[in-house]
Image (cartoon, rainbow, N blue to C red):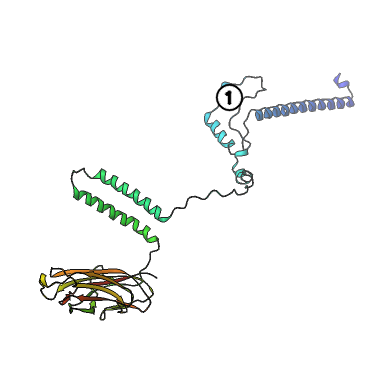
Amino acid sequence: MAGSLPASRWLLLLCVGFLAVASCVGSVGSEKLGSRGSREKKSQWNEYPTGQGKSSMPLPASNDPEPLPEQSRSIDPRDAWMLFMKQSNKGVNSKKRGKGKSKKFKFGLPGPPGSPGPQGALVTPEELLKDFRLLLKEVVKERERMSLKACEGCQEGEEEEERGEDDILALVAGPLAKSKPQHRVEAAFHCRIRRNISIERRSLQELQIYYIPQKEGVFHRGLGLNLTSGQYTAPVAGYYTFTATLHIVHGEQQKKGQQRARDRLRVLICVQSLCQHNISLETVAGLDSSELFTISVSGVLYLQAGQYASVFVDNATGSSLTVRSGSDFSAVLLGV
């Protein structure tokens, strides 16, 4: 029977067979593509999103009805922590975003400046120095109280403690005191009589021949002192304080019966050597029974520039007197 079919029929059967084979192959390919696409879609739902589009830990999909094995449901703590660290650098917490936009809009525009507050109390440097000294004394006393043992009737310990406090105050408060501008003395001197000077009875004599001793505490500043004549000429007009201290020795041994009530001794500091005409500083003393005694005079005189002052002794007694060497004469310019 097969051999009775014509050639055209055989050709038709061969074409139908090829068409059937081709349709089978196409259906199988489409099923494979569909299953592959569904698996990829499910895997996307089962994975955590990461910054690089990769995931190292699959999770079971909520829409999958099939149960998954126990191994796929468990979560590794390390992987979860690494995933959290990766996700913390995204979104609002991104470092790139923090450098630009987030800082730009973090704060609004600055507001207007506020009104100034009330002015505080004015504290002078003297008040600060006084408070600091009181505080320092309390600290020093507390320190000495803790370090030294208590002793009853120990005056030496108290003196050393006070001396230590003074030294600490001088050391600490010295620079603070220097910060305040101090008044400068422009003119001053301190000199002594070089040799003994004899004063005849019933006479007024100006003292001369002085020297400046080379000792600690002696001062001489400015011009105007003439050591030979004993006259101090004021370099500038102003108020001067003068002091003269004389050591007197009786020239003759007087008996008490020879002393008279009118016998007296005056020491003066005169201006321009005119003790009666100009204002002067004066001290009056009666004769002492002792052989050596001291008399002094001091005060303030106003001198014009170029005027001078000197020391005079008025011996209104019946015997001669001697002014001992080493007697003092000094002056300081107080101000103009």
Horizontal and vertical percent for residue 328?
Answer: 23, 72
Task: Give the amino acid at mark 1.
Answer: Ser
Residue at image position (34%, 58%) is: 174
Q: Is residue 264 above or below residue 83?
A: below
Q: Nearer the viewer, residue 205 or 21?
A: 205
Indicate the secondary structure of the residue bearing disc 1: helix
Q: Is residue 230 above or below residue 185?
A: below
Location of the C terminus by quadrant is: bottom left
Quadrant housing residue 41: top right
Horizontal and vertical percent for residue 279?
Answer: 33, 74
Residue 160 in sight in this render: yes
The residue to which callout 1 is attached is 72
Horizontal and vertical percent for residue 61?
Answer: 64, 24
In this picture, residue 167 sits left or right of residue 196:
right
Quadrant housing residue 326: bottom left
Horizontal and vertical percent for residue 155?
Answer: 19, 49
Residue at image position (34%, 49%) is: 134
Quadrant housing residue 220: bottom left
Q: Nearer the viewer, residue 234 or 29?
A: 234
Q: Is residue 156 above or below residue 214?
A: above
Residue at image position (38%, 66%) is: 183
Location of the N terminus by quadrant is: top right
Q: Nearer the viewer, residue 313 or 50?
A: 313
Residue 215 in sight in this render: no
